[in-house]
Image: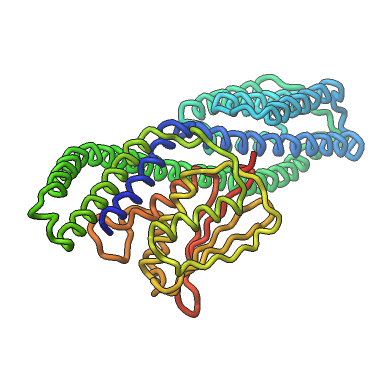
Amino acid sequence: MTDWAALRRTARATLIDAARCLGAAKPVGFGEADDHDGGRQNLLLLVQLRWIAVAGQVMTIAVAQAGLGIALPLWPMAMVLIGLVLLNVASVGRLARGGGVTEGVLFVALLLDVVALTVQLYLSGGATNPFTSLFLLQLTLAAVLLSSRATIALVALTTASLGLLLLAYRPLVLPGGEDELFRLYLVGMLVGFVIDAALIAVFVTRISRNLRRQDARLADLRQRAAEEDHIVRMGLLASGAAHELGTPLSSLSVILGDWRRMPDLTASPEIAREIEEMQEAVGRCKAIVTGILLAAGAARGEAPHLTSVRTFVDELVGDWRRMRSCFCLQVRDEFGEDEEIVSDTALKQVLFNVLDNALDMSPSFVELHVRRDGDTLRLSVTDRGPGFAPEMLARLGQPYTSSKGRLGGGLGLFLVVNVVRKLGGTVEARNRSYGGAVVTISLPLSGLTV
């Protein structure tokens, strides 16, 4: 009956998680959540850069007007600065509302920055202003953030703006004449280069880090989708196997019933006892198959009932001991004040799988440690077996990663990791320095409590 018990544990966990994948969890498209998050981070960087630009322009205008005696059209230039401030306020409001930030939003933001810089340069010497090099900053950001088509559009706009500044601009009137203009131009080129280099280095580095983080999340989503597809296929296979097993089990039950009525067989007490045991075994197998078929359509949250952490653990331990005919399990309760939760069948099956793995490796000792860490429920299963191989720890939660050498093995922890992840938790495994292994399941109580 050991094989039937293993089939039951694996199939039930498979079907429960498959049902959760199909019905209980809201799917997220590969790029949906992560694109929005990356776009929000990039828009926030543009907002920060715009604040720096506003502060820098105010400082530059003050130095030119008061320090160098250069007459500037303060009111028109102040209106441009106010427009940049309002643009930032609108961008911050969009971020606060939690909406997604698309490439079009980033393009418009960079486009308005180019227009504002063009107007400021028009009012302060046009192409003779050394700060025309700041156009390169906008183009660098566009090349990093936008598609090639949008980048080309911004390059064309920037080139047209610079060409316009060569033909039409408000000339600067300097107290020292042309010689002073040339000297200030050289100094301005140096300052503009330093500003460009510093801002490009800082902001492009941060944007690249955002993009790498987004790519990593997309890769993780693809991996999760592949694992969930694997679980769904396993659930379908288990359900099909249960249907196929129903007929031969019914036939065996009928045959054993006939044997129990045959005088030649029942005359021997030993044979009668074996027939009785076989009848009980077939009955258990039929109950297992029925449970698999019922679990195939039972998503989490269907017919839930209230319980508490301690009651849940006590029932789980009692059921596991009774089903495994094993009393080597020790329970260490350090949870503290009990708390009401919703009983979750998937979580119970997860713990069954972890306890079964520990029992296989350590038949004489298994410990379940229950504790609370802030708003987190931690359930640790400890054994005194040989521990995990390094390659297993590196691939924890991936299918068919097993040290038992069985064909098709390694699905237990794969199912455990995926079910716990659906509940918002994490699974960690480590080897103890003095022998054995510990598997810790961490679950947010907010996801289990009423």
Residue at 52% across / 52% down in the picture?
A: 315
Task: Say which quadrant the C terminus sits in.
Answer: top right
- Residue 76 at x, y = what percent? 82, 20
Q: Residue furthest left?
A: 264
Does residue 397 appear in the picture of this structure? yes
Q: In which quarter of the image is residue 276?
A: bottom left
Does residue 140 appear in the picture of this structure? no
In this rendering, position of residue 196 left or right of residue 62: left
Q: In which quarter of the image is residue 267?
A: bottom left
Task: Say which quadrant the N terminus sits in.
Answer: bottom left
Q: Quadrant of residue 196?
A: top right
- Residue 266 at x, y = what percent? 14, 55
- Residue 330 at x, y = what percent? 52, 68
Comparing 338 with 78, the one in front is: 338
Comparing 322 with 369, the one in front is: 322
Above or below, comparing residue 86 to residue 323 in the picture: above
In this rendering, position of residue 367 left or right of residue 49: left
Above or below, comparing residue 336 to residue 111 in the picture: below
Above or below, comparing residue 392 to residue 80 in the picture: below
In this rendering, position of residue 350 left or right of residue 42: left
